[in-house]
Image: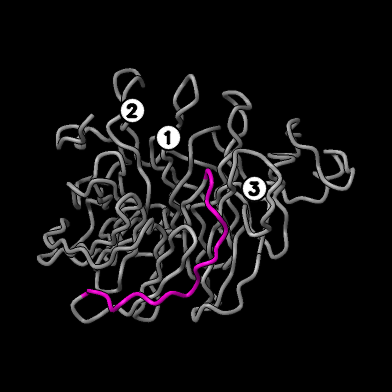
């Protein structure tokens, strides 16, 4: 079902927010990276392309589109210090960003990441420590991985050296990021399939150095996955005792993909330092879950407290059809959110409609 202007106009967001098309006709846009000048880079995994989008007249819609790179299976993107970092299935590349937004020849940092299997979508993000973090999903729904770098979060230095596992037992943590004030790392992990409509729920985890998050043996608050026995003769209860438990749990099979913390001045104060997550949508649940953008409320101490729908309406006709599957998410230089839709080739812009030119909010709002 096409994401027509009329359907986009029916999307529901909190009062004061507007959802519009930033770009369309992009086939299957996935991950997004935004440069300080507002240039947007978007990956297309199927074609292996990176496309530059630019809003030259600042009207909230891209009017320049240019392909700037192509390699097989390009997906994850991260920008730092004038370089764009790109992840494919087994490779990580870097390239300098030129003055016109195009890229120099890609430099290969790695070409020996683990095989992909079921979860080939590597994602990248820079931490407050200046290091590059890379999510590597599992090769399967639930199994013993022969490669210890599968189902992990890896850390590498920007020059490609020093690769190591930071956390394990993560089935497929595509979206992750650091709270702007506490600098604590959070990630949203995809739950195991075929455990029923209500399990496994999606996990919002605080990702800690050296921690094990349980996959494939245990999940949620220590529930056992009966199909996989823990190593070393441990019981599921014993294994659960040595794993990190989620901070929050979300509806099963919603498929969290992108995650970004709000740090800009455009949104009202009550939204500052909250996280926004794209729920790509279920494919094996009787009542569909996901197909929306969700807000994660963080309290003044920087702890996640609850979920709240932020943008909904992609499910239509009594939830029997959908006209979009939200995927990547990034904060634009003007403070708005950009959200890709890999089902309809659209990038949406979620902006606070009461913002003054330049992106600053002009409404006074109650802080939380």
Residue 315 got which mark?
Answer: 2
Q: Which residues are magenta?
A: 101-118
Q: Is residue 322 left or right of residue 126?
A: left
* Label placed on residue 247: 3
Label 2: few (<14), some (14–19) or many (≥20) C-alpha neighbours in 10 Å: many
Q: Residue 265: x percent and y percent?
A: 33, 64
Q: CA distance from mark 1 to mark 3?
A: 21 Å
Q: Residue at x 62, y 55 (%)?
A: 150
Find out whether the residues at labels 2 and 1 contact each other: C-beta distance under 8 Å. Answer: yes
- Residue labelled with disc 1: 281
Q: Nearer the viewer, mark 1 or mark 3?
A: 1
- How far from the left and from the top, in percent, is residue 32? 34, 59
Name the disc covering residue 289, or none. none
103 or 89, nearer to the observer: 89
Q: Nearer the viewer, residue 52 or 339?
A: 52
Image quadrant where one finds the N terminus: top left
Counting residues from the N terminus, which is met first, the one under dot 2 or under dot 3? 3
Quote the CA–CA distance across marks 2 and 3.
28 Å
Identify which residue is drawn at 18% across, 77% down.
100
Q: For residue 152, which quarter of the picture?
A: bottom right
Q: Main secondary structure of the magenta part?
A: loop
């Amino acid at each position: 079902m096409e994401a027509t202007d009329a359907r986009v106009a029916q999307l529901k967001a909190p009062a004061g927010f507007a959802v519009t098309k930033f770009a369309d006709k992009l086939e299957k846009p996935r991950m997004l990276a935004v440069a300080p000048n507002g240039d947007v880079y978007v990956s297309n995994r199927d074609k292996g392309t990176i496309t530059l989008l630019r809003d030259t007249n600042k009207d909230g819609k891209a009017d320049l589109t240019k392909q700037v790179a192509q390699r097989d299976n390009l997906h994850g993107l991260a920008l730092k210090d004038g370089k764009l970092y790109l992840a494919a299935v087994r490779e990580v590349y870097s390239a300098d960003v030129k003055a016109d937004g195009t890229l120099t020849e890609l430099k290969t940092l790695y070409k020996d990441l683990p095989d992909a299997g079921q979860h080939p979508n590597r994602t990248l993000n820079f931490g407050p420590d200046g290091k590059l973090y890379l999510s590597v999903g599992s090769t399967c729904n639930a199994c013993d991985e022969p490669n210890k770098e599968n189902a992990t979060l890896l850390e590498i230095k920007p020059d490609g050296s020093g690769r190591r596992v930071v956390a394990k037992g993560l089935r497929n943590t595509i979206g992750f990021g650091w709270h702007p004030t506490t600098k604590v790392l959070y990630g949203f992990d995809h739950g195991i399939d075929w455990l029923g409509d209500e399990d496994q729920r999606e996990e919002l985890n605080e990702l800690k150095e050296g921690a094990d998050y349980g996959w494939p043996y245990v999940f949620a608050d220590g529930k056992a996955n009966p199909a996989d026995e823990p190593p070393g003769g441990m019981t599921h209860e014993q294994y659960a005792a040595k794993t990190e438990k989620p901070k929050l749990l979300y509806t099963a099979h919603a498929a969290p993909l992108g995650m970004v913390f709000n740090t800009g001045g455009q949104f009202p104060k009550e939204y500052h330092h909250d996280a926004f997550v794209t729920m790509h949508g279920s494919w094996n649940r009787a009542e569909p879950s996901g197909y929306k953008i969700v807000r994660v409320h963080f309290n003044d101490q920087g702890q996640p407290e609850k979920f709240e729908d932020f943008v909904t309406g992609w499910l239509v006709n009594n939830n029997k059809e959908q006209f979009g599957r939200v995927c990547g998410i990034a904060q634009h230089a003007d403070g708005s959110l950009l959200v890709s839709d890999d089902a309809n080739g659209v990038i949406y812009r979620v902006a606070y409609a009461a913002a003054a030119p330049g992106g600053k909010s002009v409404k006074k709002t109650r802080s939380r």
